[in-house]
Image: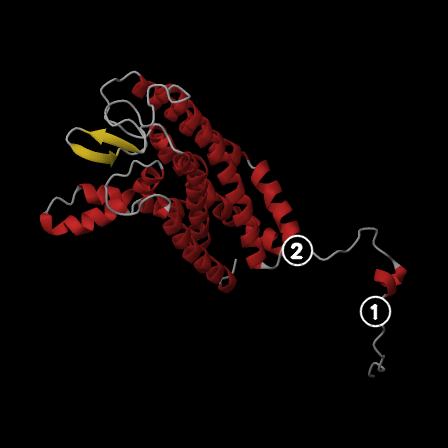
Amino acid sequence: MTTPYQAPTAPWPDGAGPGGYTSPIPVTPTGLGNALRSEWTKIRTVRSTMWTLGVLLVLVIGIGLLVAGVMSGTSDLSPQPALSAGFFGVLLGSLCVITLGVLVVTSEYGTGMMRTTLTACPSRSRMLTAKALVFCAVAFVTTTVAATVVALADSALLTGGNGAGAVPAPPMCATPGAQQVSCGHGQALGGMLAPTTDQWLRATVGIGLYVALLGLLSLAVGTMLRHSAGAITTMLGLVLLPLILALFMAGNSLEPVRNALIEYCVPNGIATLYDNAFMSTGPQGWDPLWILLAVTAVALGGAYAVLDKRDV
């Protein structure tokens, strides 16, 4: 006996379900805003975020103040930008941001939470965009605040706050037996060079953007590798290995390679933003930021491509 044909019924009116039931929960389309709120809730409620950012603040501010205190008690230092004392703390603190950037993605793969995340947000590109925006904002704000505190302290300790002890030289200075020549933006001999407006911007906002991009690059690498240890090791090698390799290249034939590794390594990029680059050649000013931005954009493109093609 066959089942008689039944014509398809119309959808339930006004969202009513079987038997005329209507859910009290409003059904609304989701978008990027919902994904952003979800990622913000996750990143601020996970203990690893608080611990990692706490260590970042301790390293950047603590080491920055320690170096500035040591430099302020030394009278035979060669002239260098006063804000450059923050370099060591930022270099070590950036490792915390790199670790957190990797864990933002790989921790969900490790626990299986990624399946739940993609069930709630089926659009994988939207999910990754939300993670990238939330993490980048958190890393940028935290690093910029820490770098600003260190910069203000460095200025007060090393230049007397208003420039005492490091009075900027006039644009043109007279030299015996010669015409006037430019003397730069700080003292010519001894003491610390008083920071310019551009140096202030690079030592605060520039450093915040650079470290946030490093973290974003780590997030992209973590998305592609989906393994915490592997992604963190890869990023640490990318940050530290070029400079270490350059130190062991002693032959004259390797000099071009050695110079290139030093000029484009991450530590030199941070030092360049502090106007205290390792070498007089290579990227200058804001150049390291644009280079890292291009590298991060390429890595994020790869992360989007890999995420869309692989199973969870």
- Which x, y percent locates residue 224? 44, 55
- Which x, y percent locates residue 243? 25, 42
To which quarter of the image does residue 18 belong?
Answer: bottom right
Above or below for 128 versus 97 = below
Nearest to the eye among marks 2 and 1: give it: 2
**Residue labelled with disc 1:** 11
Instruction: Name the foreground residue: 259 vs 243.
Output: 259
To which quarter of the image does residue 247 belong?
Answer: top left
Q: What amino acid type should be assigned to the residue bearing mark 1?
A: Pro
- Which x, y percent locates residue 119? 63, 56
SS at circle 2 = loop
SS at circle 1 = loop
User: What is the crowding at mark 1: few (fewer than 14 residues within 10 Å), some, or many (at least 20)?
Assistant: few
Q: What amino acid type should be assigned to the residue bearing mark 2?
A: Gly
- 41 sits left or right of 173 in the view: right
Residue 227 showing in the rendered view: no
Instruction: Name the foreground residue: 39 vs 202.
Output: 202
- 243 sits left or right of 143 in the view: left
Instruction: Name the foreground residue: 95 vs 253.
Output: 253
- Residue pictured at 49% horizontal, 64% vertical: 309
**Residue labelled with disc 2:** 31
Q: How many marks?
A: 2
Instruction: Name the foreground residue: 41 vs 274.
Output: 274
The N terminus - image quarter:
bottom right
- Residue pictured at 28% horizontal, 26% vertical: 187
Q: Disc 2 versus disc 1: distance between alpha carbons?
A: 25 Å
User: What is the crowding at mark 2: few (fewer than 14 residues within 10 Å), some, or many (at least 20)?
Assistant: few
- Which x, y percent locates residue 284? 31, 45
Residue sitting at the far right: 20
- Residue pictured at 46% horizontal, 61% vertical: 306
To which quarter of the image does residue 74 belong?
Answer: top left
Residue 262 showing in the rendered view: yes
